[in-house]
Amino acid sequence: MCGIVGFIGTEQAAPILLDGLQRLEYRGYDSAGIAVLSGERELQVKKSKGRLKVLSDIINGGKSVEGTIGIGHTRWATHGEPNDINAHPHLSGNGKIAVVHNGIIENYVELRDFLRSKGYEFRSETDTEVVTQLIAYYYEECGSCLEAVFRVLRRIEGAYALGILCADEPEHFIAARKDAPLLIGYGEGCNFIASDVTAIIKHTRDVSYMEDGEVAVVSKDGVEFYNSLEQPITKEHHTIDWDVSAAEKGGYAHFMLKEIMEQPEAIRKTAFSRIKDNRVFFEDLKIDADYISSINKIYIVACGSSYHVGVVGKYNLERMLRKPVEVCLASEFRYCDPLVDPRSLVIVISQSGETLDTMAALREAKALGAHILSIVNVVGSSIARESDDVLYTWAGPEIAVATTKAYSTQLVLLNMLGLYFGDILGTVSQEEYACIMNELLRLPAKMEQMLENTEDIKHFASNYFNHDSVFFIGRNLDYAMGLEGSLKLKEISYIHSEAYASGELKHGTISLIEDGTLVVALGTYSALFDKAMSNVVEVQARGADVLAVTTESHAAEMRKTVGNVIAVPNTHTIFQPSLGVVPLQLFAYYVALLRGCDIDKPRNLAKSVTVE
């Protein structure tokens, strides 16, 4: 959940580290720090609680810390409260070793007790300081930082991405990875490490992705890699093909608003390149028709907004394929003894491709023999590399913590996958196929039509931003869409918000409806519009203030009952949530704006969740 950046070269390291950390702010953090090795072989560690600007001000934008090799970190607290002492990097007692770390060391208590028995003292509450002191302990024994790191990796348990500086070895630093993202960036006369390519895209597009168990020794002239058996290996290079401007605001007040507005183009990139002769075409998909026919069950495994994509996908895939689909929270999947076998297709969805719970679920399903098909945005990410098949969303970098365009591209791609399978299985008629394809091609333009005029949504946000509790209700696809709308609102505005299937209101939830309670009623699923209207009347009778979202064809009917109505264009049923979610994203954005919230970096949240 944290950010790591490291640099070695001929330029001053501190300003480069600060710039890289600034580009990783979107991942979420509560403290920041850097360690730079001076020409006198002294480790200079500067760190502070709070935003990166606090640290930058302390070190004058990096000018007061001299040295051409260093590591930096933004921390999201897991072990120990957010404060200056617990912030990374951590320095060993002898002052020779500095470490930054993403992940969790599960056996840190046992290791800490061992080190205390050897006379080591600890200043922080973190598991990372244990790694730092343990490296120092083995370094004193063997005199080689690399050998000390190998010995430590044989003893620690858990997840880690590590950047390690040794004061006695100014010609390089060391990186190691297991179950947490880490990559190498190659420059001219300089090299980098980073937890996310965003941190270093300003300097290089040439990268290698580290695999679990690998260690890298990074110098300014090259990088040496070792596998989990401590044997030298070579790594494949990858070229990043998006421009640095894609990770900048481009005149928008917030990344989230920019990314909402980018959704039509993101859908075009994701969808249109996979259409050939008016048919869905997945060129690199390994699954063949025989396997698709043999599938007895589909699991969709994901977390957060990607899970909500899966809930929409369950409804649409079951309709198109007539096969059972189960949507599972990744954090629960491996603990529920899932009934997975070689005839199970497991669709894993993750924006970052590094979500630890989702990775663990993927490995569980793979061990049980399932075929793994992942939908991810980040090329070369861990989930992509470990899947049997991968479909990239090509949404480009998404900086705001609250996802928008990644959600929308995942949703479109999952629907396209269902259409592709349905065509092979013969469960989607050619007439229906043509209708769906026609609406898919028109989807970005309809979304652009909605985004051209947001004044009504701004007005509704100004009416409701001071509410403390909001309920989203809907049936079928509207319920699935409501889950995402509710999450967006609570993520960035900190308003308590819940989504309910409308039919469940009378089974308890309606007791919470009182005068003035805001209910966002979703009525875009035409087949159940009349029932949606019944639920609107039901909550209004208890005093609810209703904001309705429906289609243009039903807007007039909805306005007979509800004063505040947002109308979205009609489309094919499977794509209606793709349009319906847009005003919910904008509503959440404008409510959070009026409440003065930190929209791109909401409290306690991180973009890539790499701890359980």
Image (cartoon, rainbow, N blue to C red):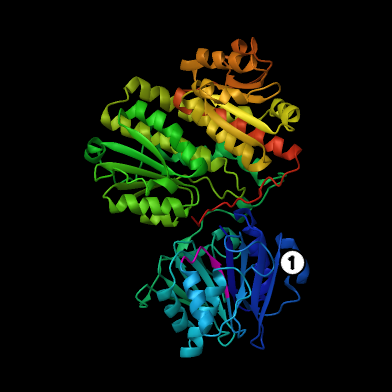
Residue 240 vertical placement versus 67 (above, below): above
At which x and y percent is residue 462? 75, 30
Residue 43 in picture, x, y percent from top left: 65, 81
Figure quadrant of the N terminus: bottom right
Q: On the image, which quarter does residue 65 sit in? A: bottom right
* Residue 347 in the image, given as x and y percentages of width and height: 37, 43
Front in this rendered view, residue 293 or 430: 293
Q: Residue visible at 54% across and 72% down?
A: 163
Residue 396 or 348: which is nearer the viewer? Answer: 348
Residue 192 image-quadrant placement: bottom right
52 within the magenta span: no
Q: Quick check: 406 left or right of 392? A: right
Q: Is residue 280 visible?
A: no
Q: Which element is circle 1 on? A: helix
Q: Residue at x 66, y 50 (%)?
A: 603
In front here: 79 or 376? 79
**Identity, as a three-letter code, of the amino acid under mark 1:** Ser
Magenta region: which residues?
A: 99-106
105 drawn magenta: yes
| Residue of label 1 | 56
The answer to whether 116 is drawn above or below residue 507 in the figure is below
Count all numbered tags in the image, as a single digit: 1
Crowding around mark 1 (Cα neighbors within 10 Å: few <14, some 14 to 19, many 20+) is many
Residue at the spot 48% in from the left edge and 28% down from the top edge: 575
Which corner quadrant of the image does residue 277 belong to? top left
Q: Is residue 22 left or right of residue 239?
A: right
Q: Is residue 545 visible?
A: yes
The image shows residue 497 at horizontal and vertical percentages of 61, 34
**Relative vertical location of residue 219 with respect to residue 347 in this rendering, above or below:** below
